[in-house]
Image: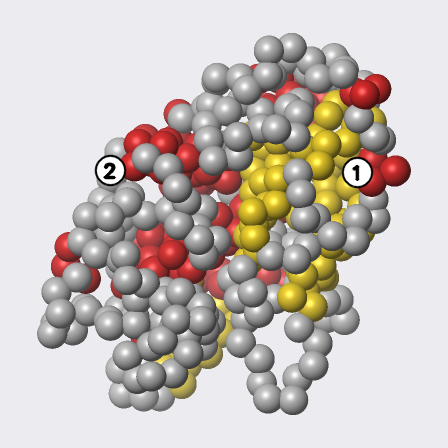
Amino acid sequence: MRFPAMFDIPGTALYDERRGEQIHNGIVIDLGSFGDQVQTTQLQLMTNNLTLMYRQLVTNAPCPLMFFGGPYTLGSDVESPGTVEVIPHSPVHIWAGTRRGSILPDGKTSNGEDMGHFYSAGLDPVFYCHHSNVDRMWNEWKDIGGKRTDIQNKDWLNSEFFFYDESGNPFKVKVRDCLDTKKMGYDYKPMATPWRNFKPKTKASAGKVNTSSIPPVSQVFPLAKLDKAISFSINRPTSSRTQQEKNAQEEMLTFNSIRYDNRGYIRFDVFLNVDNNVNANELDKAEFAGSYTNLPHVHRAGETNHIATVDFQLAITELLEDIGLEDEETIAVTLVPKKGDISIGGVEIKLADC
Ligand SMILES: [Cu+2]
């Protein structure tokens, strides 16, 4: 969870001068970074990190659809990224890069280089360490078990990517050839995963929030601008589900058509059953459902459409059990914006094969 020492020795091949000024040996990484430094203690930051990891790899990723994200199909420009991509993958990029708008060593204005932007991330040697770690998370996720397996869809398995071999000759690799690292000649050393059992148990609210005292979802959405914390009530499709029903289908809190300028930083947090005074700097709460974040994109000159349209889902079956709301027909949801201009088309809860 700390920035490794070997990347912080100026003059060596692993050093990169285009990193955030706070990025030095030993500093605690912010796995939820959205461009601003969170004003909190190191202990709270580490606690937030463990909570984010638990939510993203355990609670919110009970099946391949959630972990990997929805399929990218020809003709659709709606993105539905997977949990591991949204957090911790993207925030680590943002965290390690320079601050947008700051001055780079060559005098130019920063777009987040190197790690914080698509076009330049691979110029920092720590990129390869970061992406190997994301790859390792994939193994760790499958190791948790249940429905956490690779995708069986043939379109995915047979997707091909071009690479170059050591002689500079292009060759193709299929996804199906990359699912078992041992077949590619490597494996990850077993190590402690403290996040794996880090289920947040402390509740921010004592009882059930009075859902008749807050506006219903139909009055709040579509929401033109998420510029302050908002709470709304929302009906569930069914309640008091049996374990068998829960195993068959996952309950999904679904945000449709989240739209924002994809050149900037974005972050909002989602809580169940709290009021809009919730302290969103302390994520280690049973009611914390998850967060959305974005890695800024660079665009070609002349390109005019920078608006991303994203569907985002949170798996809330385990969460509803933990906070004692499984028998409720209506629940309270609170959204806390942390960065960027965000609009949201609609919110619904649905049951999905997962
Ligand atoms: Cu990346």
Q: Nearer the viewer, mark 1 or mark 2?
A: 1
Q: Which residue is mark 2?
A: 191
Q: Residue furthest right?
A: 218
- Quarter-of-image position of residue 168: bottom left
Which one is nearer the viewer's eye here, 258 or 42? 42
Callout 1, which amino acid? Glu
Kindly indicate whether the residue at mark 2 contacts the one at mark 1 (C-beta within 8 angstroms): no
Image x and y of residue 137, in percent: 39, 46
Q: Secondary structure at mark 2?
A: loop
Query: Mark 1 or 2 closer to N-term?
Result: 2
Residue 106 shows up from this direction? yes
Q: Residue at x 88, y 38 (%)?
A: 218
Callout 2, which amino acid? Met
Q: Residue at x 72, y 41 (%)?
A: 254
Q: Secondary structure at mark 1?
A: strand
Q: Is residue 224 above or below residue 215?
A: below
Quadrant for the C terminus, please: top right
Question: Is residue 15 shown left or right of residue 249?
Answer: left
Image x and y of residue 160, in percent: 52, 72
Q: Which residue is mark 1?
A: 348
Taking the image in four quarters, ligand 1 sits in the one at bottom left
Q: Residue at x 80, y 26 (%)?
A: 214
